[in-house]
Amino acid sequence: MSFFTFFNRALDVVLPPRPTQKIVRQLTQAELRALTLRGEKSGSLPYHEARVRALVWELKYYASVEAAELAGAILSDVLIGIRSESLGTPLLIPIPMHGARRRERGHNQTEVLCAAALRSLGEVRRHMFDYAPYIVERVYATPQQQGLAKHEREQNLRGSMQVRGKDTVRGRSCVVVDDVSTTGATFAEARRALYAAGAAHVECVALAYS
């Protein structure tokens, strides 16, 4: 038994792992890649699957290292496919989180996801994208989207995002990343803001779709 394994087991006695953490620890890349075949979009994960929900939960609320590495590898597969069809070097943009919510949670899970995907791409391929984590910002905090109908989500989000560096975005292809997409309302608002700033093309990718 390695020291790392022994240390983790000892730590589990003191701080028992969360149920979702247990699920993620047992997940493999092969299992996740098999699940992408059942996703609603190519390369995506089905959010209704219990293992996928556990993965997203660990990423969203705990910035789990295990979850980030698993999710980052899945996202990197999708990004490679997108890059092969793009001209120039696309901007990789995580969906932004309002400052107040970020301070409350301590992290933005989409930034954690993008950073993990770039690590998974490796030193050679990670330069296929220009990472721009703060180019789009939330200008005001919106109520939680959960439980809202599509038109309510769209109204809730309308005008909530803006681009900080229009010169950087103008004429560029952009790849926007979120952890979960339900109605597409968040992506629609990000597209609006980026096209208003002069983006040439906006591609939206979610780790999971519900």
Image (cartoon, rainbow, N blue to C red):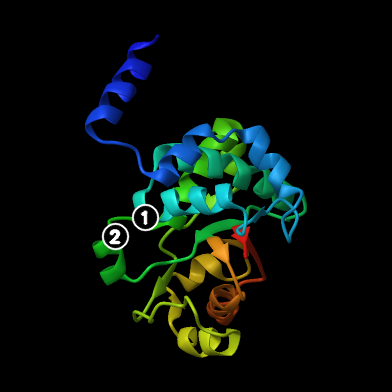
Q: Nearer the viewer, residue 156 or 51?
A: 51
Which residue is most to the left?
A: 14
The label shown at residue 4 is: none
Q: Position of residue 88 (x, y in %)?
A: 68, 54
- SS for dot 1: helix
Which residue is most to the top?
A: 1
What residue would you read off at disc 1? 61
> Mark 2: which amino acid?
Arg
Residue at (38, 67) in percent of width and height: 97
Q: Position of residue 12 (x, y in %)?
A: 30, 30
Residue at (49, 39) in percent of width and height: 24
Q: Position of residue 177 (x, y in %)?
A: 55, 60
The label shown at residue 105 is: 2
Seen in the image, is 195 located left or right of residue 131? right
Q: Earlier in the sequence, mark 2 or mark 1?
A: 1
Q: Quadrant of residue 103?
A: bottom left
Alpha carbon separation for disc pair 2 and 1: 7 Å
Q: How many marks?
A: 2
Residue at (75, 52) in percent of width and height: 38
